[in-house]
Image (spheres, rainbow, N blue to C red):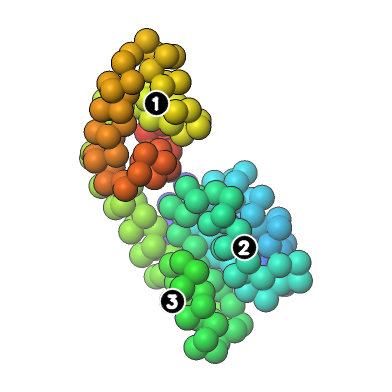
Amino acid sequence: MANVAHRVLCIEDDGDTAAMIAEELGDRGYETVIARGGEEGLLAIMKENPDIVLCDIRMADMSGFDVLQRLEDIAPRRRQIPFLFLTGLSEREDELRGRRLGADDYVTKPIDFDRLFLIINARLAGAARARAALKSQVLNDREIKVLTEVARGKRSHEIARQFDLPKRTVDFHVNNARLKLRAETRTEAAVKAAAIGLIKL
């Protein structure tokens, strides 16, 4: 039985299929949110903050491929959420395209729900391990404050003025946070910190 706290977003524009998936998910203890199409799905990712996303590919308003690409463009920090394609497209080229775009898994219809739930549980467990690993690299209060302002788009000299600190001290804290979070850039550090709840935007 899944933890009831696990919220699954199902992006599916076919009503009957969406209802069937929701019923099966509910029977296994998941909280389910249904989005009837790609545009609605993107909005639901932002609003509902699901634990995992199941997304059809062939939809009327925009394809699942477009949903994933748009998500990368407009909200890269949301890509910490596992994203699975659940589709009737079974061609190898479609699967490869989905995986190249960054999908965590690719499940074809008709749906084998036993297999699907094994995949969902594995992806949720993997995401939980990743969050725990990042949280183990705890940021101190000053690093959190400075990185929060980085996430809000402020530059080092602006943060220095705000907290009455030398700019080099701000850069020192940002660099420490970046190293702890294993991030290549200050922006990536802010994204990671926000994704695991270390900073609030």
- Callout 3, which amino acid? Arg
Q: CA distance from mark 1 to mark 2?
A: 34 Å
Residue at horizontal 68%, vertical 62%? 38
Residue at horizontal 26%, vertical 27%? 172
- Callout 2, which amino acid? Val
Q: Sequence order check: which comes first, mark 3 or mark 2?
A: 2
Compared across the picture, whether 135 is left or right of 153 comes to left
- Note whether 92 is above or below 51 in the view shown: below
Q: Sequence order check: which comes first, mark 1 or mark 3?
A: 3
Q: Dot 3: few (<14), some (14–19), or many (≥20) neighbours within 10 Å?
A: few
Image coordinates for residue 121, horizontal then vertical, percent: 39, 63
Q: Which of the numbered marks, if any, corresponds to residue 67?
A: 2
Q: Dot 1: few (<14), some (14–19), or many (≥20) neighbours within 10 Å?
A: many
Q: CA distance from mark 3 to mark 2?
A: 24 Å
Q: Are marks 1 and 3 in contact (CB under 8 Å)?
A: no
- Note whether 76 is above or below 104 in the view shown: above
Instruction: Check disc 3 and report its element: helix, strand or loop.
Output: helix
Which residue is labeled 3 in the image?
A: 115
Q: Residue furthest top?
A: 164
- Note whether 58 is above or below 25 in the view shown: below
Instruction: Check disc 2 and report its element: helix, strand or loop.
Output: helix
Q: Sequence order check: which comes first, mark 1 or mark 2?
A: 2
Image coordinates for residue 108, horizontal then vertical, percent: 54, 81
Which residue is labeled 1 in the image?
A: 156
Residue 26 appears in the rendering: no
Q: Nearer the viewer, mark 1 or mark 3?
A: 1
Instruction: Check disc 1 and report its element: helix, strand or loop.
Output: helix
